Structure formats: C-alpha cells, structure tokens
Image: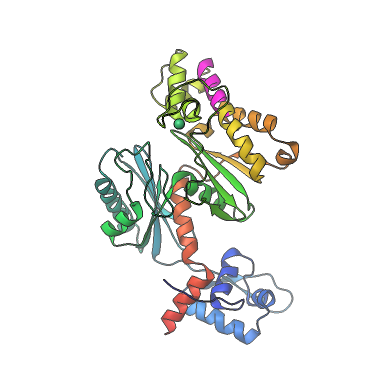
Amino acid sequence: MLVNQSTPTSAGTIFHLIKTGAATTRAELARHTGASASTMALRIDELLQAGYIEESGEGASSGGRRPRNLAVRDAPEVVAGIDLGENHAIIVLLNRRGETVAQAVHEVSLRADPDTVLGALIQHVRQLTDATPGRTLAALAISLPGPLDARTGRLLSPTRMPGWSGVDVRERLEALSGIPSRASNDANSMALAEYAVREGSVRDLLFVKAGSGIGTGSIVDGSLYTGFRGVAGDISHTTLTNAPAIPCSCGRVGCLDMVASGSAIVESVRERGGEAASIDDVLGLAKQGHPGASEVLREAGRRIGEVLSTIVNFFNPQVLALGGLLATSDAFTAGVRQAIYTQCLPMTTDLLEISVAQAGRAAGAVGIAWDTLEKSLQPEYVDAVLQLAGA
Ligand SMILES: [Zn+2]
C-alpha cells in the first residue's frame, strides 16, 4: 500500500489540477496553488520526466508569449473493464486519459463454474490487449450482475448467478491472472460511468438499471455510496402497495421484481397475447404498436417510479438517469416520469433532470474501469509513485 501526504503544491496535486482542467498552464497553476515560479517549474519537470504529463499546443495569451498548455500524457498501460452479463461479456480497454482504446463482446454462460468463466474472460482480455498495438495490461475491473458484500468481497446469493454465491471474484481474478483486480456490482459500475460521462457537472446522481433485474447506484457528493454492507440500492425486493400476490424468489410476495423485472414483463406480455421470449421481443412488439406490450412497459415504469419516488424525496438528486434495456422504451420511461412527478414534491422535482443514461451499452465495463483508473491517479498515489521512482 502506497502511503504519502500530498500537499497543495505537491506534484500529485498539480497533476490533478491539470487532469481535471482546473489549471493547464504554468501561470494558471502558480495562481491556483500559490506556489512560486521556481517550485512550479520543479514540479512540472518532475511530472514531465515521469511521463505523467506532456506539453500540448499553446494556451490563450494575456499579452506577450503564448503559454504552453499541459495535458495528461497517454501511457502504454491500460485498465481492462469487463461487464459480465447473463449471456455475454463486454470488454473495454481504457488508457490513462480514460479513453476507450479497444472494445470486444464475447458470449459467456453464468451457468459454468466461476473459475472457468473468469479464466475465459482473462484470456479474452489478454487477446484484446495483444491485438491493440503498444498496450500493456495494468489492472482488471469487473462489473457483476449480483450483490457483493463490501466487508468480505464475496457475492451474496446472486439470484442470476447460481453457483457463484460466496465467491470472491476479485480474489479469483487476481489468483488466475496475477494482475491487480477489482469487482463491483453492475448498477454501481453503471452509475460511475454515468458520473464520468458528465465530467464533473453533476455531484448527486441516482442511476437505475432496469433490465433482467432492477438495481440502483448512487453518487453522493461526487462519490459512489454503497452503504454499510455494500448492498445499498438493491431495490428489487421492495414490497409494493396493491401488488399482485405473486411468490418471489426471496420467499415473500409483492416484490417489485415480480412486476417490473425483465422476466416478469415477458410473462405479462405473453398473458396479453404477445409472442415474447425476451425483453428484446417485448421492446420489438411495443415498437410495432402491440398495445399489451406498451401497457406492460408503462406499468413496469410506474411501479419502479413508485419505489424511486421515495428515494428521490429522501436523496434529492440532481439527475435521475435511467439505464438498462428497459430505458430504451418510451412507454417505460414515461411510466417512471409519471410516478415521480405525481409522488414527489415540486421542490424535489422542479430542478430534477430525469433522462435516459448517456454512458451507452458498455457502461458497466467503462464505469468500473474508469473508477479504477481514477484511484490510481489520485494525488497521494501519484506522489507516492514519484517518490518511489526518485528513491
Ligand atoms: Zn422478492
């Protein structure tokens, strides 16, 4: 573990200012930090020599010579993000600037044993890295469709991953690959991607993943909130008022999962005469104007919105981002909006942005990779790396 104290004028802090765009010329950096010109020159040399930054073009002149702009320098190391879904995995490679430099999709089956699945994923990541010129793999970050215990790192009875309960995926990935690894659940990973895509314009964000399962991820004052045990935001077994008494996998009745999850929606559409075997089929039927499909999607949106309204009232987010396959349906998002605007106070909703998530299909993979990258570029970490390099 690298331990170091960053100061307001340490190289790590200056790197952070350049990275966030808060200050990108020597003059701006000196103004921002209050450092002397000589200290600033020393720090910038340190960052240039270590390859953390580069000079890129010229900034705006305030008279005299145009100042040189400083920017984060790309490096060969990439962080691989993996979004493990029920039937496929999306893999992305992010460079130091947080840009996706390669992406791939592979079929997987969660019914296989964990080591087999993870071993195949590692192989896919290595192949993708090898096929991307000049890149080396620095870390693995995986997004999982199940809840993780933050204290032990183990999966907690994931309903969509039978055979994975109690598995410490991070530990298994590291053991199988020898590469530093991280694991997170999908809704949290996607919330991180949504936060990243908005580039600091939002501090409080509630992300909802509505697909085969329903989950939420919360960014509170710029940080992911996971709760005491790490399972904050798992709303799928919230009991609804006036819900049909359908028995749920959790052993109770009236759960949100039983009326608004992917399988519940498919079932309801079939009862209304629609030929559907998957959410994709339901979305297709709704597009073709099948009244039953649209009504079921709108009702699922209303039900999820009903649960979200309590959270929105409590949490007062700036943005409610709707992600997952269901969020591509206008009927579904209309249902969510209707419930939120009916059940939340105007002072909560007046300035609330309810929108379809912007982070795209690879959000789970990008989000957890981006967060892993961010952690490795924090001021304390950069200062520690520079100190070790100079020692
Ligand atoms: Zn339940």
229 part of magenta stretch:
no
User: Which corner quadrant holds the N terminus?
Assistant: bottom left
Instruction: Tell me residue 291's x, y (percent).
Output: 54, 16
Q: Quadrant of the C terminus?
A: bottom left
Q: Is the residue 215 above or below the residue 51 in the image?
A: above
Vertically, is 11 above or below 135?
below
Q: Please, which colouring scheme is shown?
A: rainbow
The residue lying toward the viewer, choosing from 331 and 218, is 218
The percent coordinates of residue 310 (x first, y second) are 63, 37
Q: Residue at x 67, y 40 (%)?
A: 313
Toward the front, the furthest residue is: 252
Main SS, magenta region, reads: helix
- Please name the residue shown 26% across and 57% down the image: 176
What segment is highlighted magenta in the picture? 290-301
- The structure residue drawn at horizontal position 69% and vertical position 35%, both measured from the top left corner, is 344
Picture coordinates of residue 94, whole percent (x, y):
43, 57
Tally the marks. Answer: 0
Q: Nearer the viewer, residue 43 or 265?
A: 265
Q: Is residue 106 left or right of residue 337?
A: left
Q: Nearer the viewer, residue 155 or 125?
A: 155
- Residue positioned 56% across, 31% down in the render: 304
In depth, the one of 102 and 190 nearer the eye is 190
